[in-house]
Amino acid sequence: MSIANHLQHFLTENQADYDVVCHPYSERTVNTARAACVPSRQMAKGVVLHDAEGYVMAIVPSINKVMLGWINLKLDRHLRLASEDEISGLFPDCEPGAVPAIGSAYGMDCCWDDELNAVQDLYIEGGNHRELVHLEREQFQKLLTGQPHAAISCDPDEAEVYKG
């Protein structure tokens, strides 16, 4: 088993320094962090959104909830969650539910959460349910050069507070 071809090609093409971390089979990024013994704040997930202008991946800490209002305000868009069918079409070399949190590898615009600046090591799904890609913060930021970032997520327990 190896990480998704698109992701591997993108990392190689961008001369990224990364490691592959194997872990027992798991689904959902929070469970995957636990299975791989990775702090959940260091595990990033990609949430695929879309509107009439196209697709955007919001990259946030695994335990956080994307705040659509915040990201729409930041990007001046009207994004909503993409369906599972749309996602599988966009990530053909990935297992369902194991989308790498680097949409750029698939030609997708991204917006990443500023909270990811607070950790030195980041982990993302490798395109399957048994491998993660480990990147240092600087490598992650380099791969997302030119992509906007802002406060676009919050702890799920605080989400109701921000709905207004």
Image (cartoon, rainbow, N blue to C red):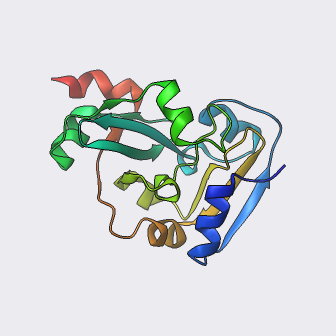
Name the residue located 74 percent from the left edge and 38 percent from the top edge: 129
Residue 58 at x, y percent in the picture: 39, 44
Indicate whether 85 appears above or below 25. Answer: above
From the top left corner, tell me how far across and down residue 4 is, in percent: 69, 51
Residue 144 quadrant: bottom left
Q: Is residue 89 left or right of residue 32?
A: left
Q: Residue at x 68, y 36 (%)?
A: 95
Using the image, determine if residue 152 lies above or below residue 21: above
Quadrant that contains the C terminus: top left
Residue positioned most to the bottom: 15
Tell me the residue at 74%/45% (across/down): 37
Regarding residue 16, the answer to whether it shows in the image is no
Q: Is residue 98 visible?
A: yes
Residue 90 or 103: which is nearer the viewer? 90
Up/down of 43 relative to 49, above or below: below
123 left or right, relative to 84: right
Number of numbered callouts drawn: 0
Q: Report the residue at 62% width, 58% height from top.
A: 7
Query: Considering only vertical position in the picture, is 108 above or below 91?
Result: below
Return the x and y of residue 62 as percentages of the image width and height. Answer: 52, 39
Pick the residue in front: 104 or 163: 104
Residue 86, horizontal then vertical, whole percent: 47, 30
